[in-house]
Each structure stands twice: as structure tokens, then as C-alpha cells.
Amino acid sequence: MVLKSKASKLSLLALAVGATLSPRGAFADGKAEAPAKKSTAADRKEVSITVYNQDFGLVREVRNIDLGSGNVNLEVADVAATIQPETVAIRGVGGDIHVLEQNYRYDLLTPATLLDKFVGQKIRAYRYNQQLDKEDAFDAKVLSVADGRPVLDIGGEITFDFPGRLAFPGVPPNLIAKPTLVWMLDTKAPPKPAAKGGTDVEITYLARSMSWNADYVMVVDDSDTKGDLVGWVTLKNQSGASYENAKLKLVAGDVNRVQPVMREMEEKAAVTETKPSSFKEEGLFEYHLYTLDRPTSVLQNEQKQVTLLEADGIKLDKKMLFYGEQYWYRGQYGELQSNQKVGVYLDIQNTEKNGLGMPLPKGVVRVYKADKSGSRQFIGEDQIDHTPKDERIRIKMGDAFDVVGDRKQTEWKELGSCASESAWEIELRNHKNTAADVEVWEPIGGDWTILQSSQPSTKKDASTFTFDVNVPANGKTKITYRVRVRWC
């Protein structure tokens, strides 16, 4: 009895109960060997790729194949070398295809595998004779192969590192040039033939070494209050297969996998799509799906860039932040920071009102600004995480050159084993010809009370308070405060 799936579902790896297959594809009970059919990329009618930003992708192909009827051995070539065989599914478009056996052949023809297959067999060895200006031929027997170095028996002598070339009488039948999927199919009730005469067969599988990431380029204006943002999708394919005129979809989000495979990839080729194109975004479960509005070719060992978004005149909020440390309140110190540079950040509201308002995949934002001559100069970059719409994006640009600060503890009093009272002085200095607004962030933790301060403070959360400080041009501003803290 053969287990059969419903016509509307994928025919996953079915099992043949009571009938087994020989290595050649014939039934062990004496039935005739099934005819062999081969399919290459030339049979593709349609291909779509969904790439996840976790180094894998989902490939869906529809191929038109002349299956005939009855039992057939189907070999499907031009699939990814990084395919996960346990994820492969096949079905007939418009009808059932019943899978009796499924195999993934990846014993590839290489010099090393060819030598391994001929261990114990005879080959020919050729060595160039310089005096006669021709090759001398020798009968040789391959005794063993270790680390790609064959040990040979030539004329009764055992030798290795033979200074010549080796020739083989043929290619062993179990070596193939490319990874291949092989099925034994039951097509007694084949799907409805396609218009061109064959049968449309849908094949899906997951493959590793397909990845994408988002990159953003932003140009800020002279006043640092507005900017133009362009987002790019950079797609890398090192799966071992090429997909021409494919429907491309990208999934942004952290998809759980049982055994994630992390692989480092080299960038071997680059293709840049300069013509603007767009992705349509939609929700998919708890992730976001981006679909390119046109077919594109995703070739092996290629890096492709396609425009994700373009937004002009978005509002920017430049922030200068001067941070403290929580543990400083739990001990006696003197001067803690001297000429400490102030961090510079750009805040962007990802809202439709601000010209954005779409879920932004994680990636690197690189920021540029024109100098007085009009030439754009690089001024900083930062990594952003997946950002939903209507959320804030904060980009760290670097440290300000002309705005610095000092921080010192002016008094310390221990109030038991886990409580203290301390006084602090912060001085901010601005060496620019324009005023600077600086936010002083004080992480503190525990139970705390500000007893006195020279400027109003703002409680941000249970363990942080801040000061908003205006530092005049070519001037300085000093903050003093006293605080009581209990941390246990």
C-alpha cells in the first residue's frame, strides 16, 4: 500500500510499504526498471524566492516536465547546493504526484572524489619526457588517497607525489557534476498536462547561504534639522544556484529555527540596480514581508542592490548627550571625567507625517553632509534594529569635537552599609560660535532623592534623571546637585 496525500496538499516524502527500490530504481519484487526523466533550469516556468535576513531562503519553482504515466525516476538538477533535503516538497499543479522515494545526490565530481572512487582500480599515469618531448604512459593502481595525495602502484613499485598527470577510464555512475534531487514517482493518475505538452510540477525547498540586509544613506541639510533618506536592500546569493527572472520577496524579523546555521560569506561579485524600484510591504504573521514589484535575476555569487525606499525632507532632531554611570553613587571618588567628549545623536520619528511610516528592516544608516564647497562628506554611521512604524530611530553619529565636559564628586557621606549621600559638579564647555543644547543623563538605581540642584531635573524612569542644559557659544555652564541613594 502506498500512502497518498490529498490533491490539494504537498506530496511530501511518502513511504512505500511492501515495495522497496533497488539502487537502479527498479522494484525489488521484479517489476521493470522505471524510465528516467531529467529536468534542468531550462524547464522552469516560474520561480520565486523568499529570502530571510538569517542566512536562508525559501525557493519555489514550477517546472514543465514530460513525466508520462506510471512509475518514473525524475532527476531535477540546477537546485541549490546548500539545499536542506528534509524541507523539499513536490506536487503536481492541478493534480496528485505520489512520491515513492526521494533522494538528494550531492556526491560531486571533483579530483578528490574521483580519486577516492578509483581506490583499488587501475588508471593511467602520464609523465613528460623532456628528452623525447612527449609523455610517457604508465599503468598504475590507486592503493589509497589521503589528503588528496594518491599512493600508486606503478610497475610493482609503490610511489606517491607522482610528477605528472593522472587519467581515468571514465566517470563513476554515482558521481554527478551538480547537486541533484531524485524522485521515484507514481504518475498513474498524472496532473492535467500544461499547455506546452508537459506536466507542471511545483518544487519547494529551504536553502542556506541566501541573505539580505538593509542599508540606508541619509544626507542632512545645513541646519541639521532635515534630511533625505534612501534605503537599499543588499541581497547575497551563495546557495550554488542561479534564479533568473524570479519573483523576489524578503522577510524582516527574527524567525525561530531549531538549528540555525551560521556561515560566513565572501562577497565575490556586485551588481547595483540604479533605476529606482519599490517594494510592497505587508504584515506576515509577526514579521514583515517586502515584495519587489518586478521580476529580477538572482545569480550565484552575486551581490545585488535594489531601492527599498526614498524619503525627502524628513525632520531630524539633533541631540547632544552626556552620560554618567550608576555605580558612581556607591563609592567615594574624586574627578571622574575630564575633557570628556559629548555624544552626538540624530533622532528620527518613523511616522507618515514625517515622510516615512513604514516598518524599517534592521541595517546600517550612513550619514553625509555637504561642506561649504558643496561636496558631500561622511559624518557617521550606526546600526538600527527592526523599527516598526510610529517609533523613534536614534542614530549615534559620534562625539562632538568642540563640546566637552567634566564631572567630579565634591562630597561623599556613607549612610550605613548600602546608602550614601553625595554632592556632584558637572561643567560643560562649548568652543563653537553657536550655542549648544546638551542633555545630561544620570543613571542612578536604587531608592534615590535629589536633595538640591542648581537646575531643574527631569525623572526619566525609576533609575534615571536628566538635566537639559544650554551652553552658550564659546562659554560654559555648571550644574551642581546633591543626592541621597539607598541600593539595598
Image: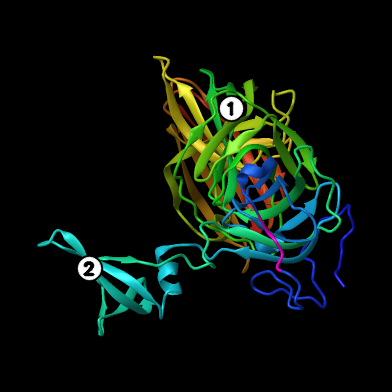
Query: Which secondary structure dominates the residues rendered in magenta?
Result: loop
Find residue 463 and report its horizontal and vertical position in percent. 68, 51
Q: Would residue 35 be counted in the magenta stretch?
A: yes
Dot 1, how many residues are within 10 Å of its Cα: few (below 14), some (14-19), or many (20+)?
Answer: some
Tell me the quadrant of the picture where the C terminus can be found: bottom right
The residue that mark 1 highlights is 230
Residue found at the very far bottom of the displayed protein: 156
- SS for tag 1? strand
Q: Position of residue 478 (x, y in %)?
A: 51, 35
Q: What kind of residue is marked 2?
A: Pro
Nearer to us in this view, 224 or 368: 368
Residue at screen point 70% across, 29% down:
293
Q: At 71% from the left edge and 58% from the top edge, which residue is drawn?
A: 88
Where, by quadrant of the figure, is residue 49 drawn? top right
Query: Looking at the picture, which amino acid does disc 1 mark?
Result: Val
Q: Can residue 385 be seen in this view?
A: no
Percent coordinates x, y for residue 150 in the rendering: 33, 75
Is the residue 440 above or below the residue 354 in the image? Answer: below
Q: Could you tell which of marks 2 and 1 lies nearer the N-terminus?
A: 2
Can residue 414 be found in the magenta stretch?
no
Disc 2/disc 1 C-alpha distance (Å): 58 Å
The span shown in magenta is 33-37
